[in-house]
Image (tube, rainbow, N blue to C red):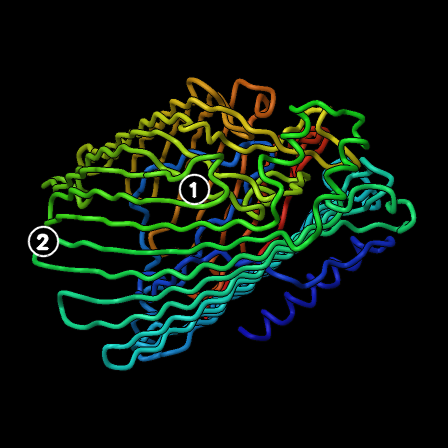
Amino acid sequence: MKKYIFSFLIFLLSLNSVLSAQDIELPDISTTIGNDSVSVELTDLPDFKNRVTEIDGSGNIVPQLPQIEKPEDTELSSSLVEENQKSLYAQGMVGGGFPCLFNCDFSLYTINGVQPFKLDFSHNSANGYVGQSLNGNYFDRDTQLFAYKKFVAGNFSLQLEGNYFSNSEGFQNKTPLFTSINKDYIKLGMDYGFIFNENFDLKLNLNSSFYNRYSQTSDIKAIENIPSFLYQAGYLFASPELITDFYFKHFSAYLSGQYVFNTNLYGLEKDFAYMNKFKNEESEIQREIILGNDETRMSHRGVFSVGLKWQNDSAKIYGNASAVIGNYLNGQNVIVPFNAGVEYSIPVYFSNRRFTIGAEGGMQSFANSVWDLENKYKFSVLSFIPEETSFWYGNFNLSVPLKSSFTGKAFVEYKRNALGNNTWEADYTEDYRTCGVYGYSKRELQLLTTEFALSYHYKIFTLSGSWHSNWLDVPLLENIQLLGLQLNLQDENARWGIDLQGLYSFENSLTVPLVNFEGFIGITPAVRVVLNATDIVKLVKAEKRVYAGEYIGRSGTASLLLKFFL
């Protein structure tokens, strides 16, 4: 088997060399990690889930289809049972395709014992979107690395995590000054815990991160007279948090205190003054867009929280409240976010799924991260630390198993900005575009969101449908109405499988349906060959799909992958 894997890797490398025979820069091996926690249960082993890359322009929030009962990977599961004493596992995927795609994803981890570790690496790149030149700066690359280790000694526990993410996006010949915008993000975390007894424990969490953005240029002199924040940025974040937990029968409570520090590592005043001159606008509106409401380079935020919960096998009632103080609260001295909720869940005799109903409401408030915003909205830049965003909200959710084969889900939520702390979004209009990048503005949002989903499962066949709606304001990169349909067929012995997914919206971004396909054939219980195609309609028609503003994203792709578990 190793011989076949090695031969397949040689074939992919040869294919990538042929497709990239022109003067194309090979992707740098860098990486991304976003695992906030690591589960070490046996059910998390060989996952082999369909990995369909979301197409830019489809919106960041795609309704999640209802949980369905798929046939178990019986061959793979039996092999795991036979190797139950094995302590070290490896899982991966590697492949490539059109247009100049390369994709790899590897994991190494342990699950036995009380001191597990996990190491993840992935790299995904594309050069030359459908219908575009390989030399036209139409490319993107993502690299991710995640490391986790847990130590346990008596009542002490220590968890260490490290994340590294690197991203590069080509400017698609939209500016003569730059060829690409590059982002590096590093996050480190340490969680220390001590259990005093069955009723009381103490935790200390230390988190820090560094974000660096820079644009690649072939002419240094050409950018000497433009604001530096348009092509570089650096932000440092640090946050210690102390948490105490109390437990008594069905009751639990916690108290916590957190300090959050964030600083802009580059000077701002010169850039701000020049930006007004550069845009030839001196209005107060333009000044707020560029400066924000605070010209300091550092933000300080303190959060003191308390929570109470009662829970048994069927019901859960909970409430939380916090006091937030800081210098980036939009003029507020203190903000008091809170929430209260209830959830009820019972088993039903005709299904192994539970009937669940729940509701929650209150006010949420959070500090905006430059990394989160610039990573979410491509080709956008911030020159300052954005202020707090707050929402009044209330939601209701329902999950109903209908006999043994059907599952229905419903979710309704109302949200509205509170206290004048509005939502920061990139503005992809021409007025906010400078040197190939877009600026930011604040929007007061009033949202009414609904999601309905239904799934049917019978033997090897599963069919799921969903309907996601924004009835009032529509968040950036989302759709007013989005319909989803998914079909899955999988052999009971996991020897083959097919997954077909379609998304459709009545708006311009998705009037051409987004159709994805993935099929696999099992060579052995631990090795699969996978054929993957995304945005098939655009692939066949060789058409572009708009991301936002004047930029496009990946449209049609086709790739051959090898997935394995060792």
- Residue 327 x, y percent position in the rendering: 49, 44
Residue 267 placement, left or right of 88: right
Q: Residue at x 34, y 66 (%)?
A: 204
Q: Is residue 377 visible?
A: yes
Q: Give residue 489's mark.
A: none
Name which residue type carries label 1. Phe
Q: Is residue 49 left or right of residue 561?
A: left
Amino acid tagged 2 = His
Residue drawn at x 44%, y 56% is: 48
Q: Is residue 103 above or below residue 275?
A: below
Q: What residue does disc 1 label?
A: 366
Q: Quadrant of residue 3?
A: bottom right
**Could you say which quadrant of the image residue 96 lies in?**
bottom right
Under circle 1, the secondary element is: strand
Front position in the image: 495 or 282: 282
Total numbered labels placed on residues in the image: 2
The residue drawn where x is 50% and y is 42% is: 328
Query: Which of the pair 460/315 is nearer the observer?
Result: 315
Residue 483 horizontal/vertical position (percent): 45, 25
Q: Find the distance from the CA under tag 1 to the CA under tag 2.
A: 30 Å
The image position of residue 134, as x and y in percent, is 81, 45
Q: Is residue 72 above or below residue 286?
A: below
Q: How many neighbours does mark 2 have within 10 angstroms: few (below 14), some (14-19), or many (20 or more)?
A: few
Q: Position of residue 210 (x, y in %)?
A: 59, 59
Identify the residue shown where x is 33% and y is 64%: 77
The residue to which callout 2 is attached is 250
From this view, report whether residue 553 is shown above or below residue 509.
below
